[in-house]
């Protein structure tokens, strides 16, 4: 079987470099070319690969020349939509990891992909464990009225709470069918100690050097608690999800939003 030709956009970034290593390591995939606005040479330096992989600032010329079947994008929100339009209109499927796309962006991507009969996978979290954590939290939410979320991240994270914590809370409330019960604290002597409120779920954000990304969902009921925890140790955690998306996206038309769809987790 012929290999799936892959292009990486944002190739010199933290995620881009990790994707390049993962693509090279997979015998079913071929890294054909790479783009990054910071590119200052015409090929990637890859000790693990004997051939030279073209690198350019201009994704358009790369797609026209090397015809990748899948473009993987880990860039910035301002660049991601341009790359998405370009890839789909030029006959490539798309795996999008860049976060911060709007609802309108997603609708446009879906329309374009349908019109051009191409597949697109957009996922805000490619770590399979994190996706399963949300799935399990959703299941447990049917049976518990009380729950809180503690998310722990490195000290350079700009936002709080994390997007994953908010997505988890939304999925939990939707499965629970109503807001969770949050016990009333009569006297909060230090403001904010009970965390932020998301429909009865208190979310607590820890920020410390030394952490990468973790999240624990704790359910409570009479005489018992249930904890579901996921820890991201490093960016390798995202790669099985990205590789799965590359292999699946070529079989689909239109937008798949979220890795859970590809994992067939059901309800
Ligand atoms: N979906 C997930 O599971 C997941 C996981 C981690 C990070 N992310 C997201 O991936 C994105 C990238 O994260 P990162 O940590 O690799 O960031 P980074 O800053 O290390 O890398 C981004 C790269 O994109 C390049 N770039 C910027 N504009 C460009 C353009 N117009 N064309 C081509 N390249 C361009 C930059 O030069 C840089 O090399 C962010 O949006 C981040 O939130 C998603």
Image (tube, rainbow, N blue to C red):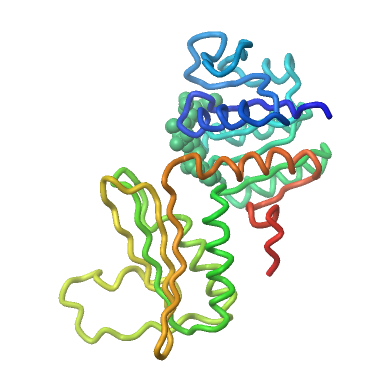
Q: Is residue 44 left or right of residue 89?
A: left
The residue sitting at 74% across, 35% down in the picture is 93
Question: On screen, 242 above or below 86?
Answer: below
Residue located farthest toward the left when viewing the structure as drawn: 189
The residue sitting at 76% across, 41% down in the picture is 119
Residues 60 and 227: in front is: 227
Question: On screen, 8 above or below 54?
Answer: below
On the image, the x and y values in percent for residue 227 come to 43, 71
Can residue 252 be seen here? yes
Q: Quadrant of the N terminus?
A: top right
Can residue 112 be seen here? no
Question: On screen, 63 above or below 81?
Answer: above
On the image, the x and y values in percent for residue 12 come to 49, 24
Quadrant of residue 260 within the rendered picture: bottom right
Residue located farthest toward the bottom when viewing the structure as drawn: 222
The residue sitting at 35% across, 51% down in the picture is 153
On the image, the x and y values in percent for residue 26 come to 66, 31
Residues 67 and 143: in front is: 143
Q: Is residue 128 left or right of residue 40?
A: right
Q: Is residue 179 left or right of residue 262?
A: left
Count numbered badges in the picture: 0
On the image, the x and y values in percent for residue 125 come to 54, 49
Quadrant of residue 139 within the rendered picture: bottom right
The residue sitting at 44% across, 63% down in the picture is 229
Q: Quadrant of the C terminus?
A: bottom right
Question: On screen, 152 above or below 235?
Answer: below
């Amino acid at each position: 079987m012929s290999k799936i030709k892959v292009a990486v956009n944002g190739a010199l970034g933290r995620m881009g470099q990790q994707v390049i290593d993962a693509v090279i390591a997979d015998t079913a995939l071929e890294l054909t070319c790479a783009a990054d606005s910071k590119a200052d040479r015409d090929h990637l330096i890859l000790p693990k690969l004997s051939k030279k992989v073209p690198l350019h600032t201009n994704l358009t010329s790369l797609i026209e020349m090397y015809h990748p079947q899948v473009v993987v994008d880990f860039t910035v929100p301002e660049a991601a939509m341009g790359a998405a339009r370009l890839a789909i209109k030029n006959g490539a499927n798309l795996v999008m990891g860049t976060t911060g796309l709007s609802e309108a962006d997603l609708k446009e991507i879906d329309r374009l992909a349908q019109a051009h009969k191409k597949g697109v996978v957009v996922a805000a979290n490619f770590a399979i464990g994190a996706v399963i954590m949300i799935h399990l939290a959703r299941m447990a939410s049917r049976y518990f009225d009380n729950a809180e979320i503690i998310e722990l991240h490195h000290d350079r994270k700009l936002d709080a709470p994390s997007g994953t914590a908010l997505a988890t809370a939304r999925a939990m409330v939707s499965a629970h069918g109503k807001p969770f019960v949050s016990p009333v604290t009569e006297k909060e002597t230090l403001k904010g100690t009970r965390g932020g409120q998301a429909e009865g779920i208190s979310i607590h954000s820890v920020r410390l050097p030394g952490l990468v990304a973790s999240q624990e969902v704790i359910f409570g009921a009479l005489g018992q608690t249930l904890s579901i925890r996921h820890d991201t140790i490093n960016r390798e955690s995202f790669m099985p999800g990205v590789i799965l998306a590359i292999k699946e996206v070529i079989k689909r038309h239109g937008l798949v939003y979220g890795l859970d769809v590809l994992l067939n987790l059901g309800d």
